[in-house]
Image (cartoon, grey):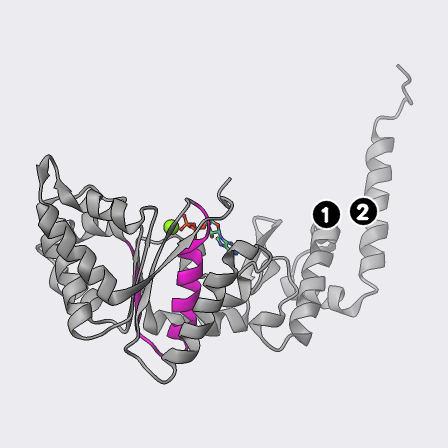
Amino acid sequence: MTTYGDESVDFKYNKQALVESFINASKDPDFKKLVTRLKVKDEIAMKYTSKLQDSVCELKNCAKCKCLEECKNRRKGAVYYPSVQNNMLVFNSMACKYQKEYDAKLENTAVSFEEPYQIRTAAISDIDLTDKKRAPLIKWIKDFYKKYQTDKHIKGLYLHGSFGSGKTYIIAALLNELAKNGAKTVMMYYPRMLVDLKESFSGDFATKMNLIQNCDVLLIDDLGAENVTGWNRDEILGTILQSRMDNSLPTFITSNLNKEELEEHLSYAGSEKNVLKAKRLIERVNQLTEDMELISKNRRV
Ligand code: ADP
Ligand code: MG
């Protein structure tokens, strides 16, 4: 092993390199402005030169940007931004002004129960169009969007098919787009929403049911993944579908089951079989929706 006597040489060399790249970066007025704004000593800032340059680059993108769709940053609608914590710089994704406007608009109109962040924030502009198997669905969605501008009482979709193919994502993106234009939308992850409804019996059960029954556009997400009971089939699902039908309100359903499989699934409440009740529910689903299958690659793997 070769030793060079003074072990601090390496450190000195690194420090020298840090100083040089910091001085170089500081030639950019935007870089200098950001460091000044942070009110942090140069000795600390210079440890983060390359990350700070990333922030500056994203801030420059933002300065030229006119809307969310134009966003060029790593994470859409966000800027990689530093803050000072205990003499260190910590970098986070902060929502930009366009993203904040978008979120505020949705907050007033788009209600979501038990859905994950990606689904709550799904956007039509982010839908991956490269998968040809989705083309008929995307066309359907666009037609719906157009028709909905003049008629608020059109049929939704019973979208069934393979796991992870994007069923929930695409319908959620449509609902968010409608909500941006003022429609009151509700999307609910059905199996977990049932638990939530049960727990809210002594609280806001009626308010939640009222919202689900009467919102402008509803998504019942993952119907068929729940454990069927007489209560959830007849009192919850039956009631929701009936009132949506009575008021001709657009209703979307996603499921891994096709209609025949759904009928079979709904026939059993525990070990008790009741084919007639299941058939009645399927009739309501048919009244409310058009049928479409989506078989595509699993995006979750
Ligand atoms: P499904 O409801 O068919 O089981 P999801 O809609 O939940 O599938 O999609 C699976 C995963 O892929 C989710 O994490 C979702 O956010 C993502 N995803 C689906 N479609 C798209 C898309 N068009 N663009 C970006 N991400 C997508
Ligand atoms: Mg789904």
Out of 278 and 90, give the one closest to the viewer: 278
Out of 201 and 94, give the one closest to the viewer: 201
Residue 230 image offset from top left, x and y in percent: 9, 46
Position of 51 relative to 65 (above/below): above
Residue 158 image offset from top left, x and y in percent: 32, 59
- Residue 166 shown in magenta: yes
Q: Judge whether residue 224 can be spotted in this image.
A: no
Residue bearing the label numbered 2: 18
Residue bearing the label numbered 1: 47
- Label 2 within 8 A of ligand 1 by Cβ: no
Residue 200 image offset from top left, x and y in percent: 14, 54
Q: Judge whether residue 189 can be spotted in this image.
A: yes
Q: At numbered mark 1, what does the secondary structure look like: helix, strand or loop? A: helix
Taking the spot 39% from the left edge, 49% from the top edge, the residue there is 161
- Residue 34 shown in magenta: no
Residue 199 numbered tag: none
- Label 1 within 8 A of ligand 1 by Cβ: no
Q: Does the residue at mark 1 contact the one at mark 2 (Cβ under 8 Å)?
A: yes
Q: At numbered mark 2, what does the secondary structure look like: helix, strand or loop? A: helix
Specify the farthest residue to the bottom. 150
Real-space Cα separation, disc 1 to disc 2, in angstroms: 7 Å
Q: Is residue 231 left or right of residue 20?
A: left
Q: Quadrant of residue 109?
A: bottom left
Residue 7 image offset from top left, x and y in percent: 84, 26
Out of 186 and 285, give the one closest to the viewer: 285
Mark 2 surroundings: few (<14), some (14-19) or many (≥20) residues within 10 A? some
Mark closer to the chain start, 1 or 2: 2
